[in-house]
Image (cartoon, helix red, strand yellow):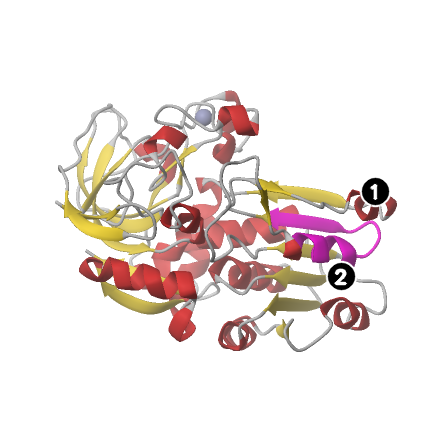
Amino acid sequence: MRALCWAGADAVEVRRVPDPELRNAQDMIVRVRRSTTCGADLPLLGGRVPEASAGEVLGREFLGEVVEVGPEVRRHRVADRVVVGAAVACGSCWFCRQGLLACCDNGTSGVTAEPEWGQPSAGGFGRPARLGGFAGGHAEFVRVPYADVGAFAVPESVSDDRAVFAADAAPAGWYGAELGEVAPGDVVAVWGAGAVGQLTAGAAVARGADRVIVVDDRDDRLRMVARHAGVEALNHRYVDVLAELRERSGGRGPDVCVDASGTPAEPSRWPLTDTDGGTALREAVHACRKGGVVVVLDARPGVVDRFPLGALADKGLAVRAARRRGATAIPELLARMARDELVTEHLATHRMPLERGADGYALFRDRADGCVRVVFTP
Ligand SMILES: [Zn+2]
């Protein structure tokens, strides 16, 4: 089959790779209809993930049609249209039973970054195999492990272009508002107007926030989130963000501050002992009202330096962090999509065939031409 593969630093290319096959009784094979770029791909594309091997298939978020099911798959049949959660989890370990699918003990395909992170996390599509990942969805076919746990039937009325965002971007964004315990009347600030930041802002509105303010440095993205989520936008190139947020929150600072700025477009700084930007996180800690909540939604693998511990403790802030939600939220998000309460297709600013994967990733990395997400069709 054809698949978009990592081909070394700053290079992706479509290659012919072997078709995936069922390996376990709970596996299924999906013929991909849509897949999307993800900010978490950028460190890999930058060539700074030493665990990656050329030829590995990219693509964390995808949607497709079931073409083959293993003997123990109960919830899916051939020809079902499904969206597949980006985290691979077993559904039965202690963490999965607590609903923490992204923390699964059994989801990885092998070696993980356990020495750096202390414990393994769930597996994921389109991550290097040596970090516990599985071949991704920028391909004609994908093997989906633990199919009953991570894949969900898409309601007939929801288009492919909308539902593909239920794989990870929407669950992550909604998780940001959930972790922040956004409540009616809150003032919420979100750093980052990429897909996850925009969806976090929308989730904060849906939870009844009084004001939601999104901070970014791109006018095109800010215009989009203001229009689609009905929120306020701040471009930190033109305004003093801290002063402006204080002003817009009655002088106290926002109740909830979410760092959804994601992975910097420039290559991530590996190895893990190096430090990384963290500008938005520092700003969030400084902006947040005393006793508020700071949420970090981040895909960076490494370490952030100059963390403002003093401000954190003095202000009595809570910090909660996640890389992804896990699949548990997907059915509810699909139901919201079916009711037109959650609209996502505008985030696919660019659509192209998989053959143009290299062009698509260049656009996405450089945030060129107003690019928020590129959606590929095999
Ligand atoms: Zn598990």
Query: Is residue 310 located in the magenta-colored stretch of the structure?
Result: no
Above or below, 29 relative to 179:
above
Q: Please, what secondary structure does the residue beneath circle 1 have?
A: helix
The answer to whether residue 344 is seen in the rendering is no
Q: Amino acid at mark 1?
A: Ala
When asked about the image quadrant of residue 288, the answer is: bottom right
Front residue of 176 and 352 = 352
Front residue of 233 and 187 = 233
Above or below, 122 relative to 10:
above
> How far from the left and from the top, in percent, is residue 179?
64, 46
Mark number displayed over residue 254: 2
When asked about the image quadrant of residue 66, the answer is: top left
The answer to whether residue 218 is seen in the rendering is yes
Q: Is mark 2 within 8 Å of ligand 1?
A: no
The residue indicated by pointer 1 is 313
**Quadrant (top left, top right, bottom left, bottom right) of the N terminus:** top left
